[in-house]
Image (spheres, grey):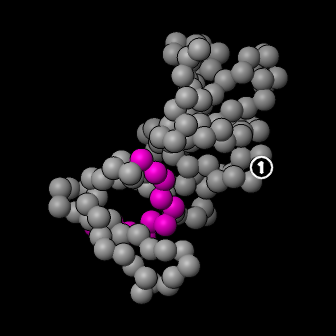
């Protein structure tokens, strides 16, 4: 069984938060809580509006360097797997499964596939902090 945890992209401050504690819902007026890692549950800060954040779920998988893979991460795989081509994939949830979707539109060689089919992934960043990784040159 995988560990259920999240991190959150703060839309307002443009930074990733990994000290997510909980949320009340997804509707206007709902809230989200954070805590400082060095503090215990009494260290909870004031709640923030839920709509200020994009919640990103942990997939339960790690890359070849032991880095946890989250929704929204940009991963790569050894080019030898893809006939010498280098591909970036974006991790997302689709139909209840973790998908690694190619950043190259309409490329029949690297369409979206199940994340666990990527045998040797490497986290290159994420779509919020490192969008330049997937921009076309």
Q: Residue furthest left?
A: 29
| Residue 15 horizontal/vertical position (percent) | 46, 51
Label 1 Cα neighbours within 10 Å, binned few <14 / some 14-19 / many ≥20: few
Q: Residue furthest front?
A: 13
What residue appears at the point 79 percent right and 16 percent down from the top-left corner?
84
- For disc 1, the marked residue is 65
Query: What's drawn in magenta, residue-wise?
Result: 14-24
Is residue 22 in the magenta section?
Answer: yes
Kindly state the secondary structure of the residue where label 1 is placed: loop
* Total labels drawn: 1
Measured along the vertical axis of the image, is residue 38 above or below residue 117? below
What residue appears at the point 50 percent right and 37 percent down from the top-left corner?
127
- Pick whichever, 24 or 11, lies toward us: 11
- Pick whichever, 116 or 74, lies toward us: 74
- The main secondary structure of the magenta stretch is strand
Quadrant in the picture for the C terminus: top right
Q: Quadrant of residue 91?
A: top right
Measured along the vertical axis of the image, is residue 18 above or below residue 91? below
What residue appears at the point 47 percent right and 59 percent down from the top-left corner?
17
Measured along the vertical axis of the image, is residue 66 above or below residue 77? below
| Residue 135 horizontal/vertical position (percent) | 54, 22
Quadrant in the picture for the N terminus: bottom right
- Pick whichever, 45 or 64, lies toward us: 45
Q: Is residue 89 left or right of residue 35?
A: right
């Amino acid at each position: 069984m995988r560990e259920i945890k999240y991190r959150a992209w703060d839309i307002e401050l443009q930074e990733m938060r990994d000290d997510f504690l909980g949320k009340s819902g997804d509707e206007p007026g709902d809230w989200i809580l954070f805590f400082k890692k060095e503090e215990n549950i009494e260290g909870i800060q004031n709640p923030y509006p839920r709509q200020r954040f994009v919640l990103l779920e942990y997939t339960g998988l790690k890359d070849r360097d032991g880095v946890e893979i989250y929704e929204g991460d940009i991963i790569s795989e050894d080019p030898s797997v893809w006939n010498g081509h280098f591909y970036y994939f974006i991790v997302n949830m689709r139909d209840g499964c973790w998908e690694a979707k190619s950043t190259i539109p309409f490329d029949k060689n690297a369409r979206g596939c199940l994340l666990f089919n990527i045998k040797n992934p490497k986290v290159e960043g994420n779509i919020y902090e490192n969008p330049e990784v997937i921009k076309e040159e």
